[in-house]
Image: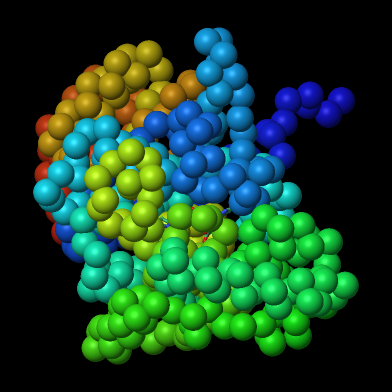
Amino acid sequence: MANPFQAIRGMNDILPAESALWQRLEATLRETLAAYGYREIRLPLVEKTELFARSIGEVTDIVEKEMYTFADRNGDSLTLRPEGTAGCVRACIEHGLLHHQTQRLWYAGPMFRYEKPQKGRYRQFHQVGAEAYGMGGPDIDAELICLSARLWRRLGLRDAVLQINSLGSSAARAAYRERLVGYFAARREALDEDSQRRLATNPLRILDSKNPTMRALIAEAPSLLDHLDAESRAHFERLQSLLDAAGVAYEINPRLVRGLDYYCKTVFEWVTDTLGAQGTICAGGRYDGLIEQLGGQPVSGVGFAVGLERLVAMLAAAGQPSAGAPPHVYLIVAGDPAQRAGFALAERLRDELPDLRLQMHCGGGGFKAQFRRADHSGAQIALVLGENEVAAGAVAIKPLRETGEQLTLPQSEVAAYLRAAALERTLTPSNPD
Ligand code: HAM
């Protein structure tokens, strides 16, 4: 009979065979963010529904149809966070982090969207986001983009292309929106169903349509970049000049509009064609109006988030090994007295050699079965405690990978032996798979 309990569709288990790759990715992200002076903020997974409706926008796909919203026992409407920016702004306002100061922050964790699951698109997925506050100029936009570019270099990912655009000020965007509605309304019969709906609610999103029948119509549409206000234009030009100076290549994509309403001026995405349809690995932009809109001071904000599932898929496709490091040493203990002596020895070795990965045999069994486990563990060396060794205060040492000699040492000398073996690199980890 099939197991009645299965994970929710679009919500994945990350199994031990994959977790080492995730940990490596997360460590690289943490180190790179720290290198640019970003500090971690940890935020709740659940916020008031109204926070997301107000910030992401009432007529976006996320708020209209993708949020996991529920009433708690008090009757308050709560939502599992679909993204991190809104909660980050909420926390910064609530804790006074934006008064006369700048902030560079990052957060990590699961986000939830009721989307149609497919490769690279899940209902629970993981982001690492970076947000910077109190800096209105293009320098911080450029810094965030340089940081993301460095991430790909450190991860050894070469196939990501940077696309940038400017959405302009809200006034300029409103004027552009009117022109765009005029253009599409005159061609209404050529619009697909989704775009007809968007024409009334969120016409800029029509530019983002992936429907091939809409391609020519969109290509001919008036360009946002021709409608920029002077300040946004200067901001965008300066951003380009800073990216040029930093040696970060980019493409200008005037159709890049993003699916969340809070953006103004700079928006950007890193896109790869190695992942199929879900090729955006990192996306973000400036959201100067949002802090005020959520009740804070008029402070500027800008940031991005990377999608970890997509990065893991890219790393795996690039041939990066996913298995973790095996133990250096497997401790075999045959019989009750050996088990007691084994616990004492294992804890002493862990005290003396904090970097040692020692796996102790648990679950009983004879020598043969235990050696089989030792071999399977990928360890370099087996330490063997049987009746004779315990009686002599000794331990037998057996190399598992090379045809080295077996020897017996007093238990008090094992730590020194393992330290010397580590120096000789006999203990470099091997991969059991
Ligand atoms: P977003 O474009 O909605 O932006 O998401 C950012 C990234 O999260 C995407 O580029 C993608 O890599 C990943 N992602 C999004 N949805 C899914 C999904 N269903 N499954 C797997 N991965 C996904 C934001 O969330 C903004 N808060 C980014 C930001 C931060 N803007 C300014 N600051």
From the viewer's perspective, tell me whether residue 30 is left or right of residue 277. left
What is the x, y in percent for residue 42?
A: 32, 37
Residue ID at (76%, 57%): 197
Q: Is residue 180 visible?
A: yes
Which of these two is toward me, 175 or 231? 175
Looking at the image, residue 199 sits to the left or right of residue 146; the answer is: right
Residue 245 on image: x %, y %: 24, 88
Residue 255 placed where, x, y %?
A: 58, 77
Q: Nearer the viewer, residue 399 or 85?
A: 85
Q: Is residue 395 above or below residue 184?
A: above
Dividing the picture into quadrants, the one containing residue 137 is: bottom left
Residue furthest top in the image: 73
* Image mark count: 0
Classify the position of the N terminus by image quarter: top right
Q: Residue at x 20, y 45 (%)?
A: 98
Q: Residue at x 74, y 74 (%)?
A: 184
| Whether residue 217 is situated above or below residue 379 in the rendered picture | below
Across and down, in percent, residue 242 comes to 26, 83
Name the side, left or right, on which 2 lies relative to 56: right
Taking the spot 29% from the left edge, 24% from the top edge, the residue there is: 342
**Rendered view: 270 above or below 388:** below
Task: Tell me where residue 352 sits by quadrant.
Answer: top left
Q: Which quadrant holds residue 351?
A: top left
On screen, residue 183 versus residue 248, left or right, reads: right
305 or 126, which is in the foreground?
305
Q: How is the image coloured?
A: rainbow
Can you see residue 312? no
- Look at the picture and state if 33 lies above or below 109: below
